Image (spheres, rainbow, N blue to C red):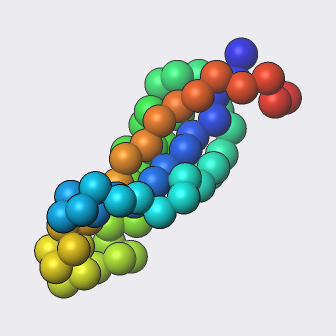
């Protein structure tokens, strides 16, 4: 079983999100969840504190079962 890591950036101001982005396949739930946390931190850093504060942005991730090999 493989797990697809999916990220999306949303605004708490109006509840909108940009389209989800697939960022990799993992061999375990743990690996996917851990990488989701790492990717979230890197994405927040790349967006920047000012834009995040201004638009009340947050990053959500999920690990989805996939049949990819």
- The x and y percentages for residue 35 are 48, 43
Residue 34 is at least partly visible in this image? yes
Residue 52 vs residue 25: left or right?
A: left
Residue 36 vs residue 54: left or right?
A: right
Name above or below for residue 6 compared with residue 40: above
Name above or below for residue 68 compared with residue 20: above
Q: In what quadrant of the picture does the N terminus appear?
A: top right
Name, please, the residue furthest toward the right: 69
Name, please, the residue furthest toward the front: 14
Name above or below for residue 13 compared with residue 48: above
- The x and y percentages for residue 46 are 38, 76
Q: Nearer the viewer, residue 6 or 26?
A: 6
Residue 53 vs residue 64: left or right?
A: left
Q: Quadrant of residue 45?
A: bottom left
Which residue appears at 49% of the width and 50% of the height?
7
Q: In what quadrant of the picture does the C terminus appear?
A: top right
Residue 13 vs residue 16: left or right?
A: left
- The x and y percentages for residue 28 are 59, 22
Which residue appears at 16% of the width and 79% of the height?
54
Name, please, the residue furthest toward the bottom: 50
């Amino acid at each position: 079983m493989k797990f697809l890591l999916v990220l999306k950036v949303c605004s708490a101001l109006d509840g909108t999100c940009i389209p989800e982005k697939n960022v990799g396949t993992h061999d375990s739930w743990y690996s996917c969840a851990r990488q989701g946390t790492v990717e979230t931190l890197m994405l927040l850093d790349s967006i920047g504190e000012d834009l995040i504060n201004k638009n009340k942005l947050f990053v959500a991730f999920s690990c989805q079962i996939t049949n990819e090999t």
